[in-house]
């Protein structure tokens, strides 16, 4: 054990090792700050509420606001994580969330004070014929798969962030 401490002490005095170590610390600090901003923009509760509403084939306008802000935020280059493993997981989550938001924009339409999934083909709001119902079921299956993908990507990103950033 003393040998490891001696080697570590000597290595810390080598300029290259010291430089790489301080560079890694700077990346971790950057990514911690970014994660705090991420949490401020998109809380677990906001994401869960968004995914739950989509699963129920409706969407309240207030629920969409944090998602929209987050997608815009994550598109900015300065808001990219520096640790490669976080970059990859965050990019996967952000791309899947942006795709789900876009899919929702194509298939959810205003209905009173909320958005509904294809109200003209949705059996809750109309009497669709067999072709319309088949299309509606296809859209709902695609939506379900996308929701699961976003949820899984988010969990992978969060667990990786906690492990890498020790928070």
Image (cartoon, helix red, strand yellow):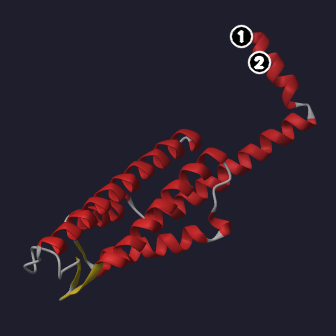
Percent x, y of residue 167: 51, 44
- Outermost front residue: 131
Residue 125 appears left or right of 46: left
Percent x, y of residue 64: 35, 75
Query: Residue 50 is drawn in which quadrant?
Result: bottom left
Say which element carries label 2: helix
Percent x, y of residue 147: 33, 58
Q: Nearer the viewer, residue 45 or 11?
A: 45
Categorize mark 2 by other alpha carbons within 10 Å: few (<14), some (14-19), many (20+). Answer: few
User: For the point 18% across and 72% down, which residue is it?
Assistant: 131
Q: Is residue 6 above or below residue 25?
A: above
- Outermost left residue: 127
- The numbered disc on residue 1 is 1
The residue wearing badge 2 is 5
Q: CA distance from mark 1 to mark 2?
A: 7 Å
- The numbered disc on residue 128 is none
Q: Nearer the viewer, residue 79 or 124?
A: 124
Q: Is residue 104 above or below residue 89?
A: below
User: For the point 20% across and 64% down, which residue is it?
Assistant: 137
Q: Is residue 4 visible?
A: yes
- Tell me if label 1 and label 2 are in contact, CB under 8 Å: yes
Percent x, y of residue 39: 46, 61
Residue 15 appears left or right of 166: right
User: For the point 10% across and 80% down, which residue is it?
Assistant: 125
Residue 134 appears left or right of 47: left
Say which element carries label 1: loop
Task: Identify the image quadrant of the N terminus.
Answer: top right
Q: Nearer the viewer, residue 77 or 140?
A: 140
């Amino acid at each position: 054990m003393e040998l490891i401490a001696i080697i570590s002490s000597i290595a810390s005095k080598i300029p290259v090792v010291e430089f790489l170590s301080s560079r890694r610390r700077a990346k971790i600090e950057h990514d911690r700050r970014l994660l705090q901003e991420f949490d401020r923009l998109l809380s677990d509760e906001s994401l869960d509420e968004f995914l739950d509403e989509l699963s129920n084939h409706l969407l309240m306008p207030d629920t969409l606001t944090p998602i929209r802000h987050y997608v815009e935020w994550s598109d900015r280059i300065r808001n990219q994580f520096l640790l490669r493993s976080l970059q990859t997981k965050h990019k996967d989550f952000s791309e899947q969330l942006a795709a789900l938001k876009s899919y929702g924009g194509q298939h959810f339409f205003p209905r009173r004070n909320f958005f509904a999934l294809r109200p003209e083909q949705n059996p809750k709001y109309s009497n669709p014929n067999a072709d319309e119902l088949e299309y509606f079921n296809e859209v709902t299956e695609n939506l379900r798969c996308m929701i699961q993908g976003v949820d899984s990507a988010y969990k992978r990103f969060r667990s990786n962030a906690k492990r890498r950033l020790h928070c």
